[in-house]
Image: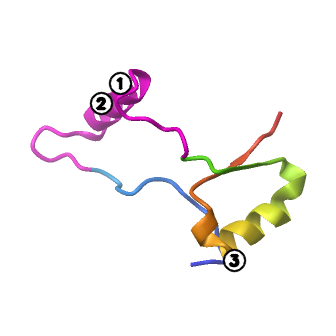
Amino acid sequence: MTKGLSIVATHDHHDLGGWTQARIDALFFSLSANGAFPLDGLITQEFAPHECKSAYHLASDKREAVMGLLFNWT
């Protein structure tokens, strides 16, 4: 689907064997905070909102160059 743009998560819920979404979220943020799950490199490009056409072009036509796009709203 290249006409829409939404990135939420890879799974909706797990709730199996004691692994609730709340427990998974807590573990993820704990591992991220202590450096065991590094997030460096997940955002590969940053754009200002007025650059949205360039961002969409990159995400749509050059997928191999994109891991994650960030819009800086400041």
Q: Is residue 55 above or below residue 46?
A: below
Report if the CB atoms under discs 2 and 3 are less than 8 Å apart. no
SS assignment at label 2: helix
- Which residue is nearer to you in this view: 10 or 40? 40
- Which residue is nearer to you in this view: 4 or 46? 46
Left or right position of 36 against 65: left
Residue at point 14% right, 47% down? 16
**Residue 17 on the magenta span:** yes
Which of the 4 quarters of the picture holds residue 63? bottom right
Span of residues in magenta: 14-41
> What is the C-alpha distance between the residues marked 3 and 1?
35 Å
Tag of residue 27:
2
> What residue is shown with label 3?
61
Report if the CB atoms under discs 1 and 2 are less than 8 Å apart. yes
**Residue 26 on the magenta span:** yes
Three-letter amino acid code at disc 2? Leu
